[in-house]
Amino acid sequence: MSETWYNPTPGEKLGIDTEVDTRIGDDIAADVAADLPALVTAGVAAAMTAAAAAAAVVYDNGNSGASKAISAANGTRQKITLTASAPTLTVSGLTVGSYGEVLLYLIQDGTGTRLLPTFSPVARYGAAGAPTLSTAAGAVDIVRLFSIDGGTTLNVVLVEKGA
């Protein structure tokens, strides 16, 4: 003998009686109300954890050499080890017509004494002028490279010296 199950559509009355239909609906609503906040909280927490993990990733551009390309497509947090004095860093991948930025960790190699890279496109430093980097071996300075015109104009701001 096979069993047949009836699966009512949402809102459909079972036809048993109004009191039973209302109680079944109330029980389902109570279960949903009890479980939903925990499910939403878990989902939001998972999404926030994934976003935080993605934001914490720092792309390693390796050693600078005399010149190196820095692509915004590699993420908004990047690092590079300076292995030549005043290397040329060419920044690309910023979206035309919108704001874009890269937080760049400039790391002195084992020799140190490396100077601020020359940026292409030509960088603007604002009223404070071009920053002076920490020069000790292994020192880390953080600069924010940003553009409001897709990289035609590159603005450079020292965020932290000797981090």
Image: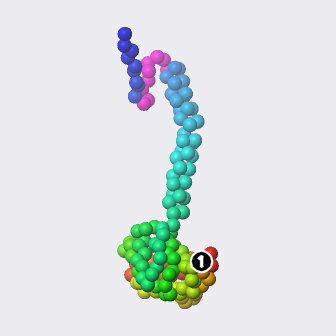
Residue 42 visible at all:
yes
Name the residue tied to disc 1. 138
Front in this rendered view, residue 162 or 66: 66
Q: Amino acid at mark 1?
A: Gly
Q: What crowding class fits label 1: few (fewer than 14 Cα within 10 Å), some (14-19), or many (20 or more)?
A: some
Q: Up-down: is 112 above or below 5?
A: below
Location of the C terminus (image quadrant): bottom right
Can you name the residue that lies furthest to the front here? 110
Q: Residue 101 location in percent, x, y? A: 47, 73
Residue depicted at x 44% and y 18%: 15
Q: Up-down: is 136 above or below 58?
A: below
Q: Is 138 inside the magenta-drawn segment?
A: no
Front in this rendered view, residue 138 or 75: 138
* Residue at disc 1, secondary structure: loop
Q: Is 11 inside the magenta-drawn segment?
A: yes
Q: Residue 79 location in percent, x, y? A: 51, 73
Front in this rendered view, residue 41 or 92: 92
Q: Up-down: is 59 above or below 131?
A: above
* Extent of the magenta region: 10-18
